[in-house]
Image (cartoon, grey):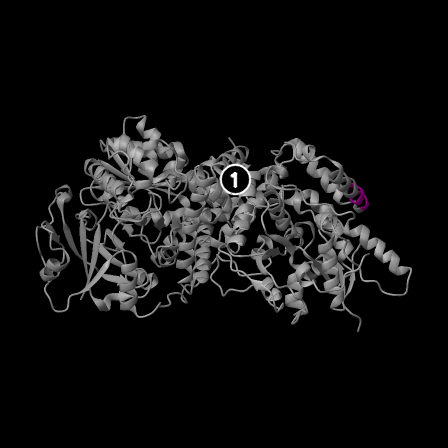
Amino acid sequence: MSDRENILSAIRANRPQEEIPLPDLSGLGRALGDRTETFIRMLESVGGEAVWLDGRGIDSVIRTCYPEAEVICSAVPDAPLGIAAPDDAHMLTDLDLAILPGAFAVAENGAVWVENRSGGDRTLPFIAENLLLVVLQEEIVDTMHEAYARIDFAEAGFGVFISGPSKTADIEQALVIGAHGAKHLTVLLV
Amino acid sequence: MNHSEAAARFVADDARMHWHDKALWFVRQKRDSASKSIPEWEQLREAAEGIKAHTLSRLDHYLEQFEREATAKGIHIHWAADAQRHNEIVHTILLEHGARKVVKSKSMLTEECHLNPYLEARGIEVTDTDLGERIIQLRQEPPSHIVLPAIHLTKEQVSDTFYTHLHTEQGNSDPTYLTAAARAHLREKFLEADAGITGVNFAIAETGGIVVCTNEGNADMGTALPKLHIACMGIEKLIPSLEHLGVFTRLLARSATGQPITTYTSHFHAPVEGGALHIVIVDNGRSHFLRSEKYHKSLQCIRCGACMNTCPVYRRSGGHSYGYVIPGPIGSTLGAFRDRAAFGSLPFACTLCASCTAVCPVGVDLHTQLYHHRQDVVHAGLIEKKKRFMLKAAAWLMAHPSLMDTAGKVARKLLQLLPRKLLYGKANVWGRGRELPSVPKQSFREQYRKSRAASSHSDKKHPAGGEQHE
Amino acid sequence: MRAPKIGLFIPCFVNELYPQVAFATLRLLENLHFEVIYPMAQTCCGQPMANSGCSSDVEMLAYRFVENFKPFDYIVAPTASCVTMVKEQYETFFATDDADFQKVKSSIYEVCEFLHDVVRIERLDVSFPYRVGVHNSCHGHRILGLGSPSEEHMPHYSKLENLLRLIPDIALVTLERYDECCGFGGTFCVTEPDISVAMGQDRIADHLRSGAEVMTGADMSCLMHMEGIIRREGKPLRVMHIVEILAESLEKSEG
């Protein structure tokens, strides 16, 4: 018998014979307050920053937030800036700033949903020193329950919730911002 | 060395023991703040338990669905009955791709299977990329906590390790400096890697995809740069559909560290263009748990570590004192089930305070399981014969009140008469840090009997009184 | 209508070493006009054996317990851990339809539970002008529900504090870790003595830092362990079982 058959038959023999019913999740998802205000507060609590577009152009935002960024790559369809994403992600190693669209954001934890439907490069959200995520204010939801109702993987090969800059507390529980991913994260609210 | 001996050593370094205890209590407090900020917290816990219980009751169905959905998305599914098979499969996949350098993000399953030494013995370089894991890898130690692997180390110890292996400044123990050094060092490893190995936090049957949660972004760097991604998962990681992730992603990080969510929650549903995604589904004894009435709930564990952070014994003895791949309350019950002879003593390294059960986000009845393990260990004849006999004798004595009375009288007399040196000799384990209780002249029963006898000789009802101690 | 009859259940070590706790419980209940009987044939509840893995040896103790206590309307005991033993662990020894066991299980109370929930005591003519720290023993706290566990998301409550607050001149201190285990844990106190003592020391230090002059609680086992440490280390903290405080003003006389 293959490992697969061994495992499945062991499970069938050992698991309860009667199915335990799924719980009802419909009551979950209470908002914690005003969506935008909560999102910004939670984003800041995890070390991120929120800025408003306020009629400016994205390049103006970049000049304000990341004046020293030289090597930039943008995956925002309306704002192709800087270099084009190369075929080989290994070339992105000196990237100062990556700009990506966020499909929506989650108020309860300051997270932004970033998708990759193309199957192409996935390093962009992680390899840059700094990250700018662009989110429409009306696309902020209250909780993860609403978030998952908006996600499907029929097409997308990869998606990630990003909540703040990368961090670690592995050395004596001292919080250090900037582990392997971005050292700084800004969410640009439109 | 058993837990008791290892713990005694840990406690002996009083400053360090209290430092370790405070560090973990702080994590527990952060968990409390996070949980108390969510009004629905207790309902989320119940929902999580229910989802896991349901899934385990139909696990074969969900695994088959997962395999179908994943395969349709171009993901390769492998099945490994045990640790050896898991290691062989991972190795074979690496060989087929000509991979010699591997980066690995945190996976307790790969620890359980001892994957690193297996691959290293076959000429493959494995770099653990979680900062805590990398530190202990360089030090050649096992992790002492499943979420905070280096929690037992001071920053000075980390500094020494980095000085030796990464050539950082000697004596510079600033965590920011050390982390930056690790970032640079590990970035090279990411760029050179041929393959990335990750664990799996959740596997979704409905979509055939997997979810990996990190704060550092190392799982993502390690699977986006090299094109080959191997994900290793235990069979119990399944959940039915995306909507259930809503519950678990709200509970996991808050329970583990008090964060509202991990920095990165990555959903892998297809290989990278020109790459490959392999998922290895591992049993390694998990299916045995399913049959156990008493212990099957431990399969619901989502490896958050909250039970360790709250356990007053773990905090004061450290993860290494358990001698099992996973320490603390969940480790003790898992280990004792898997190998009663080797780990049957772990359930006794516990006061049954039940704090673990109260923090568990998925309703594992930890303290109840540890109590049951104690019965099973004794039943299996694994307790010292002498100890067993003494407990049996004590039970017999306690069932005979008049004999107990006599024994009590004798004991009390002895305690009064014995000189301190004898009384507090080596054999008196109680006396190692405590005085024995002071001894009254008479037991309650003796006084009560006297006073009832006295009142039956007179008409007046005589409320009983208490006697002074000496 | 006759007054309800209470069977007084006294843990074996309280009987031997802390008779004043048993007498305080007796006085408290008699003062409330209950008829209180201490069945002389009572034995240990068997918890030390059960927690050591020898629960099968407890069977005869469980039968005796039910025999001894089934005649009573209530069974009251100055101990949460022994009450928990009877309510939670005795089930395995009896058939589900065993009426005597079900009666005993549903009528057994730890004394604070009894005073707070059944008697609903509203006043205490006691003077106790001291700063008091409440030690929340694990069984009573997390299993019998004597107080809100710090781990859980629920409004704060404490039956022990509610009872103590009936004393007009008492001052209750706020502890840093109000429900951390003291390390007694039954045989744990001698199988892992170093951690056991370390845990007890930390509880004591918390009480002292919080300004307590008296440490109290509902379980004499925890208090015995911590009192042992206090006396060995000469710490300025007095240890009293909560019934001793609640019964402070009640008439004492020599037996």
| Left or right of residue C20, residue A111 in this image | left
Q: Nearer the viewer, residue C143 or B410?
A: B410
Q: Nearer the viewer, residue B47 or C9?
A: C9
Q: Nearer the viewer, residue B443 or B305?
A: B443
Q: Which residue is mark 1?
A: B337
Position of residue C96 relative to residue B342, above or below, is: below
Image location (x, y in percent) of residue B302: 41, 49
Under tag 1, what secondary structure? helix
Image location (x, y in percent) of residue B252: 38, 53
Q: Is residue A125 magenta?
A: no
Image location (x, y in percent) of residue B279: 31, 42
Magenta stretch, overall SS: helix
Q: Nearer the viewer, residue B463 or C4?
A: B463
Can the viewer see residue B167?
yes
Work out which quarter of the rendered image holds the C terminus of chain C and state it: bottom right
Query: Which of the 4 image quadrants contains residue B15?
Result: top left
Image location (x, y in percent) of residue A182: 21, 50
The amino acid sitting under disc 1 is Phe
| Left or right of residue C121, residue B172 in this image | left
Q: Residue at x 75, y 67 (%)?
A: C31
| Left or right of residue C166, residue B49 in this image | left
Work out which quarter of the rendered image holds the N terminus of chain C and state it: bottom right
Q: Which residues are magenta?
A: B402-407
**Chain holding disc 1:** B
Can the viewer see residue B125?
no
Pointer 1 local density, CA inside 10 Å: few below 14, some 14–19, many at least 20 = many
Position of residue C146 relative to residue A16, above or below, is: below
Spot the residue most to the right. Answer: B457
